[in-house]
Image: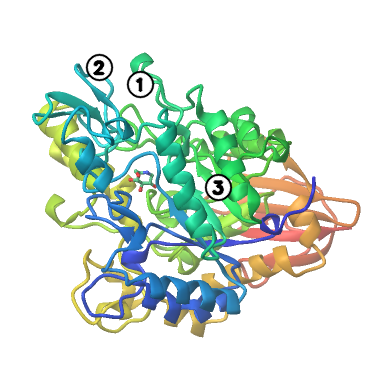
Amino acid sequence: MKKKWWHKSVVYQIYPKSFKDTTGNGIGDLKGIIKKLDYLKTLGIDVIWLSPVYQSPMEDNGYDISDYQAIDPLFGDLDDMDLLIEEGNKRGIKIVMDLVVNHTSKEHKWFKESRKSKDNPYRDYYIWRDEPNDLRSTFGGSAWTYDDKTNQYYFHNFAKGQPDLNWENPVVQDEIHRMINWWLDRGIGGFRMDVIDLIGKEIDKKIVGNGPRLHPLLQEMNKQTFGNYDVLTVGETWGANPHIAELYSDPERNELSMIFQFEHMMLDWGPLGKWTPKDLDFIQLKNVLSKWQTELKRGWNSLFWNNHDLPRIVSRWGDDKVYRVESAKMLAIILHMMKGTPYIYQGEEIGMTNVKFDSLEEYNDVEIHGSYQDIVVENKYLKHNEFMQGVYQMGRDNARTPMQWNDGKEAGFTEGTPWLKLNPNYKEINVENALERNNSIFYTYQSLIQLRKNSPYSDTIVYGEYKLLLNDDENVFAYIRSDENHELLVIANFTNEEVPLNLEYEAKKIILSNYKDTSFKQSLLRPYEAIIYELK
Ligand code: NOJ
């Protein structure tokens, strides 16, 4: 495979609202991100994926854009954005923007025009029908909303305030291409493409994801825009399998650099999806992650445990109490030694955990409230308390509580009142603490990043073969990464107990581990113990 800069990069995702506030309004901003660039440089990342900072009424915290070419005043302005790009560049950090083009906000001027009349020039920018079909919104309720102005329904896969663009309309395609180029010319490092698998939809046939027009549209977009730049593009694609992933990311097809696949992230979803979680089947997790490692051949993987839509991994599949530090490090090690581009979500590097607010009202997320209305109030599939269990375990606000910088007022996030309550554990879990302790989770992430980018093992980690070991072991995740120069063994105990390690190996070196006194040959693994060896 032809080498690309983003094969070797590590990306850090920032959710701007919750990262760092410099104005005292309780909402993070671009100047706050600039202030923390040196921190990110210390961590060692190369790219920031910035969740949306465009002008938005914030119904879905910026995933509802009312002007693609303006920065929301909450976050700053275009000068701040240019400065962020510049200051990032100085430190070798590229800025990848979020591209949300499946839908706009209902406050976008295109939609305001579109809804005025059936013959408005913008009418066909969106999807209007006389009769709705039974498609449902991801955030609960029908995917259609009636507009009495013109006596038709418009389609929105997400909230009512997020009407879907009509990608069948070539004028829409041109508008979006122009906008993409405008950003690329400002010097950004690429795009994370929000629910991009939905743009090829055929609504009348009820095909929403992976529609027939998807790949031609992406090829055209690539040709008109980012294909002419050396940038990273990553598509959010919930419905991908390794074959579909090759369609997107095979370099010869000229679509995207890579995609986010979510197969591993849905393994503990129950009958009502994330709202009725079940226990993780560990063998399944190993199989799914390994399948992606070995079956995605003509394409490129991304690696992640977390983002702004997912609960905190240490609370989900680690132990956020007794073994928080050990388990967070273990999860980092097992993921970062795989093949693909790793993504770290803000706070993951210090082991931030899920949060539990007292009442539903304290949650901000439009998905939580929309789904509550649908599942509890209207359809009565779950009782209030049952739904709240789902929120505690899986709700998106778990990831969105403000970044915990220190143990001072509001964790050093803001001088004012934060838009979403902090996790009270910031007194203990915060960046300042993490930086002061040389055995903190932060430094495990830092080491993993250095191993990938700047070590004798870089090529083995980035491009080496992957082989799963101990396939049927209920407790241990073990695999080998190898090329002609090195053979690396990665092993991890996924439980909070001591477990036997039934593996014969001869280690030459202990490269990294999450316990102090790991030995060259272990027959037992301590709770959440994880080790990277170089083999003889
Ligand atoms: C996926 C984004 O990650 C999520 O936060 C958002 O709510 C939906 N797409 C709609 O844009």
Task: Give the side of residue 180 with respect to residue 308, left or right.
Answer: right
Question: What residue type is disc 2 on?
Answer: Asn
Residue 224 % position (x, y): 57, 44
Identified at 51% across, 35% down, the residue is: 263
Disc 3 marks a residue whose amino acid type is Val
CA distance for labels 2 and 1: 9 Å
Relative to 207, does residue 99 appear above or below in the rendering?
below
Give the Cα separation between the discs numbered 3 and 1.
Answer: 25 Å
Q: Regarding ligand 1, which quadrant of the image does it lie in?
A: top left
State the mark number for residue 133: 2
Mark 1, residue position: 203
- Tag 1: amino acid: Ile
Of 8 and 438, which appears nearest the observer? 8
Label 3: few (<14), some or many (≥20) within 10 Å? Answer: many
Snapshot quadrant of residue 201: top left
Residue 167 can be seen in this image = yes
> Are circles 2 and 1 on residues that touch, CB within 8 Å?
yes
Residue projecting furthest to the left: 148
How far is the residue under mark 2 from the one under mark 3? 31 Å
- Residue 402 or residue 38, whichever sits in front: 38
Q: Nearer the viewer, mark 3 or mark 1?
A: 1
Does ligand 1 reach within 8 Å of label 3's beta carbon?
A: no
Q: Position of residue 479 (x, y in %)?
A: 72, 46
Residue wearing tag 3: 234
Instruction: Using the image, determine if residue 108 lies above or below residue 137.
Output: below
Q: Secondary structure at mark 2?
A: loop
The colour scheme applied to this rendered structure is: rainbow
Q: In the rendered image, is residue 306 in sight?
A: no
Q: Earlier in the sequence, mark 2 or mark 3?
A: 2
Categorize mark 2 by other alpha carbons within 10 Å: few (<14), some (14-19), many (20+): some
Q: Which quarter of the rendered picture does the C terminus lie within?
A: bottom right
Residue 32 point in image, percent of width and height: 37, 77
